[in-house]
Amino acid sequence: MEPLYYHLVDLPSIPDSFMQDLLSRAYHEQRQDTSQNHLRPEYRSRMISNIDSDKLLPSTRSQRFKTSDDFAHWIRQNIVTDYTECSISVTEHALGSIHGAHTDWTRHWLLIYPFVTGGAKCQTTWYQQHGQSVQRPDLGCYVTDYSEIQVLDHVIMQERSWYALDTRVLHGVENIQHDRITVQIGLWHLDDVMTKLIF
Ligand SMILES: [Fe+2]
């Protein structure tokens, strides 16, 4: 069987009543990025080479913002009881149309629910770096030279559906055409949703 880097997960849709608050938190003028990527300036400002052209292209990044206590409570009641973080995330198109290949450093799996996908061609792609294992032991690693990696798989996620992504495998987002807005729940394992995986 082919290894799976992502799964569609049969979990309840997020009620519309939470939408307004989540979006206002995502774009609040005093929002505070909880991703801690400010601690890694070299990650935040990296340039991608050898992807589709010989030009260097800036990598955008995922910024994460705190949700309300009510929303976190709904997640614990309806989605998973135990998580590393529950956030509303924005991947800003203004910073770049690629989110460069990386492994996450605060989780092994990401339960993600796109409100806005980033465009019809926006895809999450998994890669393997030459000479390295597919699942990386090093959380928070990244690659800027795409001649060092090969594509393993990709998915174009649908709006308002839950997916579980293996974030220990190098992954990134390509073809970001406008801001991508997602709810993100960090997990160390899939035990709580194992019976809900559709594929
Ligand atoms: Fe990631």
Image (spheres, rainbow, N blue to C red):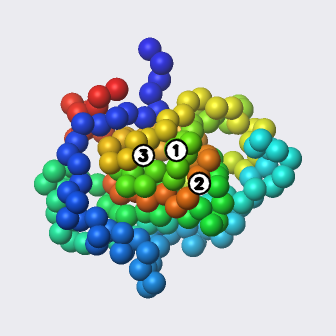
- Give the residue at x 48% y 18%: 2
- Give the residue at x 70% y 36%: 149
Q: Which mark is residue 120?
A: 1
Disc 2 marks which residue?
Answer: 177
Say which element carries label 3.
loop
Marks 3 and 1, the one that precedes in the sequence: 3
Among the 4 quarters of the image, the one containing residue 134: top right
Neighbor class of circle 1 (other Cα within 10 Å; few <14, some 14-19, many 20+) is few
Marks 2 and 3, the one that precedes in the sequence: 3
Residue farthest along the top direction in this orientation? 1
Q: Which amino acid is tagged 3?
A: His
Say if mark 3 contacts mark 1, CB within 8 Å. Answer: no
Marks 1 and 2, the one that precedes in the sequence: 1
Residue 21 x %, y %: 28, 72
Say if mark 1 contacts mark 2, CB within 8 Å. Answer: yes
Q: Which amino acid is tagged 2?
A: Gln
In space, the residues marked 2 and 3 are separated at their CA atoms by 27 Å
